[in-house]
């Protein structure tokens, strides 16, 4: 499973990159707005650090404008993956981006048939939002398992990018189901690395080591 970080914060990106854990980055308009920086240079800097796929989302909602934005974003770096919303105009824009050789991550997927459609049209990634579905009491893992089954049935090459992850269990469950990528917020990334028994165990080892040395 590939690990992407779901943030536009450069310090967080550098931190997880330094651990050798980072395969890519996803951003969205909310995450970029939080940083208070200019969009294009920010994405360029993220690409420079990561040297892997970096999702940057369009804000237009009409296909012609989406494609124009997609071309502009794709020109920033070879690492940019353009994010388009899974709406009718987004599907139209996806078809044109695929034709133009632009890699696309289709976002805001909440049901398996949306994932089927974006794979048919040629998305590089499909992003089902797990946490937001759980928030409205629908089992996100059922959705994820159905998408996996559909993609395997038809040997689609679109990668399933599990998004809107809220806790380590989401990451583990998505890995069991076979999501290709998990995009993980920094706070959840931190939790993946911690276990109280690891900390207690290390403390005891080091205390014993000191005692043994007299
Ligand atoms: C994915 O690419 C999105 O940026 C993200 O996972 C949305 O997560 P949220 O539901 O925590 O906002």
Image (cartoon, rainbow, N blue to C red):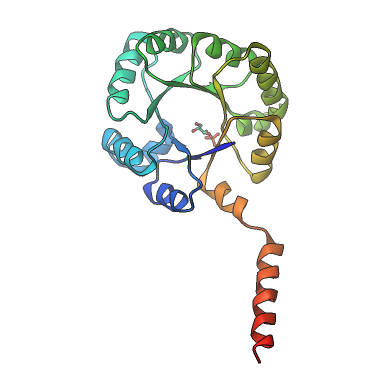
Q: Quadrant of the N terminus?
A: top right
Q: How far across and down, in percent of the image, does residue 86 sit? A: 50, 16
Q: Quadrant of residue 98?
A: top left
Q: Is residue 115 visible in this depiction of the protein?
A: yes
Q: Residue at x 69, y 86 (%)?
A: 212
Q: Residue at x 28, y 29 (%)?
A: 76
Position of 161 relative to 153 (above/below): below
Please tell me which residue lies in front, 188 or 18.
18
Q: Residue at x 29, y 36 (%)?
A: 44
Q: Residue furthest front?
A: 213
Q: Residue furthest bottom?
A: 214
Q: Is residue 62 visible in this depiction of the protein?
A: no
Report the label total: 0
Asked if residue 103 lies left or right of residue 134, the reply is left
Q: Residue at x 66, y 81 (%)?
A: 209
Q: How far across and down, in percent of the image, does residue 92 sit? A: 43, 7
Q: How far across and down, in percent of the image, does residue 66 sit? A: 35, 15
Q: Quadrant of the C terminus?
A: bottom right
Q: How far across and down, in percent of the image, does residue 4 sit? A: 50, 38
Please tell me which residue lies in front, 133 or 184.
184
Position of 107 relative to 98 (above/below): below
Position of 12 relative to 104 (above/below): below
Asked if residue 128 lies left or right of residue 201, the reply is left
Asked if residue 118 lies left or right of residue 154, the reply is left
């Amino acid at each position: 499973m590939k690990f992407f970080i779901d943030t536009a914060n450069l310090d967080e990106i550098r931190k997880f990159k330094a651990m050798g854990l980072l395969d890519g980055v996803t951003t969205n308009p909310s995450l970029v707005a939080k940083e208070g920086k200019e969009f294009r240079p920010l994405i360029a800097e993220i690409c420079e650090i990561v040297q892997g796929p970096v999702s940057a989302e369009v804000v237009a909602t009409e296909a012609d404008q989406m494609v124009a934005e997609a071309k502009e974003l794709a020109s920033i770096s070879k690492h940019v993956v353009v994010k388009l919303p899974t709406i009718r105009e987004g599907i139209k824009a996806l078809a044109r981006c695929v034709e133009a050789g632009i890699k696309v991550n289709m976002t805001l997927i909440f049901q398996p048939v949306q994932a089927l459609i974006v794979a048919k049209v040629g998305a590089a990634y499909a992003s089902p939002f797990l946490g937001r579905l759980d928030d409205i009491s629908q089992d996100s893992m059922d959705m994820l398992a159905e998408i996996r089954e559909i993609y395997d049935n038809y040997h689609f090459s679109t990668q399933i990018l599990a998004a809107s992850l809220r806790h380590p269990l989401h990451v583990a469950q998505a890995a069991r189901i076979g999501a290709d990528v998990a995009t993980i917020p920094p706070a959840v990334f931190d939790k993946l690395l911690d276990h109280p028994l690891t900390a207690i165990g290390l403390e005891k080892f080091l205390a014993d080591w000191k005692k043994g040395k007299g």
